[in-house]
Amino acid sequence: MTTYLRRLMVDPCPLRHVAKKVIQKLRIGSYEQRMRLGAVDRPNYAYCVYNAAVLAKRLRYQRISVLEFGVAGGNGLVNLEYHAQNVSKRLAIDIDIYGFDTGVGLPEPLDYRDLPYRYKKGFLIMDVPKLRARLKKAQLVLGDINNTSKAFLEEYSPAPIGAIMYDVDFYSSAAAALKMLEAPERYYLPRVFCYFDDIIEPSCDTVSTDLTLHNDYTGERLAINEFNQAHNDIKLTVPYHLLARWIVEQWYHQIRVCHFFKHSRYNEFVYPEAQELPLE
């Protein structure tokens, strides 16, 4: 049985799923309409990039950056280019893209927190020349994340970061990547949209899910929890507005929003001015 059929069988709204696939394949409607319906590849990436750009425009930024930690083969980075191109055109804002990876696959797990029963050294090797040839705009930042996450901001001087995709598998790698959030506020929007790939497994793959058993004491979940406990003024929060929707997509559970409460622009008003509720 194909992955698509498995997903369809466990989907509570199979007709909606089929309709989204048709809309996506035939490119019915504008990019923004398809994005809002989730009828695009990696709607989780689209959501983060689009909303980061909307916030940046409300705050009058002309340029932002989006990051991906854990590039592997590069499909996610190519997808980020697609979404960034469409969002940039729609909102008239420049979007730079950076992808972090060792380039040589996963390192050796350090201890139980890196889930060695799930991951092995050498998994997810990148074909660097092939990926570089495919990329149009995104820049690869190759090396040990413990080093690249520290040197990146000073070496690249990126535009304010508005969205980050974390797909690093290990607790140790996630903890190193999250440390970058401690940098000066000039490197970030006051709220940053984040996606964490490895805090749940795909619901259609029950065997993988029941073997991986993501929990709050290992992997990316532990790194998030420890980061929140260690910082009073920076918090990675659950997007309750997504979880309150009538239909909750799986990836909604993988979104977090990083709030920089002490950011000098955190309190700037970003909503439309007209908010009257006249008496009926």
Image: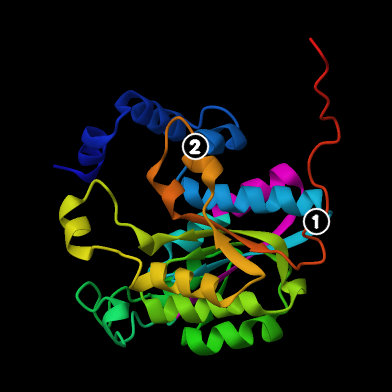
Rendered-image quadrant of the C terminus? top right
Q: Mark 2 = which residue?
A: 244
Percent position of residue 190, x then y = 72, 62
* Span of residues in magenta: 82-101
Marks 1 & 2, CB-CB < 8 Å contact: no
Nearest to the observer: residue 219 or residue 76: 219
Percent position of residue 257, x then y = 58, 57
**Position of 22 relative to 207 (above/below):** above
Q: Mark 2 falls on what kind of element?
A: loop
Residue at 61 percent across and 36 percent down: it is 32
Percent position of residue 162, x then y = 66, 61
Q: Which is nearer the N-term, disc 1 or disc 2? A: 2
Nearest to the observer: residue 155 or residue 126: 155
State whether residue 72 appears in this view: no
Q: Mark 1 = which residue?
A: 267
Percent position of residue 150, x then y = 60, 87
Amino acid at pointer 1: Asn
Rendered-image quadrant of the N terminus? top left
